[in-house]
Amino acid sequence: MANTTSAKKMVRKIERRTLVNKSRRSRVRTFLRKVEEAIASGDKSAADAAFKAVQPELHRAVTKGIYHKATVSRKLSRLSSRIKALAA
């Protein structure tokens, strides 16, 4: 357990940041799920719309430190290729 006042303050700050990060991560996952469902249903226009909505959310998550830049880039690339495959 934290002994110093600064360590106790850090514990309080970490708890608050954890809650914020949890909600941000949940929001991103919701957007990703919408894209996955559109791809699974085979609806290209819905998948395109969902993909356009998820892109800024993922990039915002990078700036907030939720995801690594390469992880987001890889996710977007794979989603994009799956959506392109729907048209074929």
Image: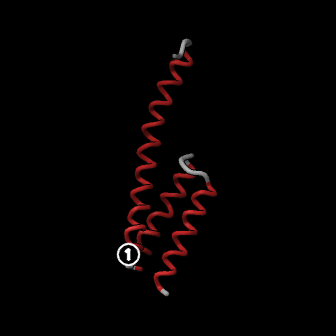
Q: Residues within 10 Å of mark 1 (few under 14, many from 20)?
A: some
Q: Is residue 2 above or below residue 66?
A: above
Amino acid type at mark 1: Ala
Judge by depth and name the residue closer to the eye, 51 or 84: 84
Locate residue 39, reporting x and y percent. 42, 73
Locate residue 62, reporting x and y percent. 57, 52
Q: Is residue 12 above or below residue 24?
A: above
Give me the residue at 47% from left, 85% from top. 87
Q: Quadrant of residue 33?
A: bottom left
Give me the residue at 50% from left, 61% from top. 56
SS type, badge 1: helix
- Residue extending farthest to the bottom is 88
Is 35 displayed left or right of 81 in the figure?
left
Give me the residue at 42% from left, 67% from top. 36
Judge by depth and name the residue closer to the eye, 44 or 12: 44
Locate residue 21, reporting x and y percent. 47, 42
Tally of marks:
1
Locate residue 13, reporting x and y percent. 49, 28
Would you name the residue on which mark 1 appears?
Answer: 46
- Residue extending farthest to the right is 70
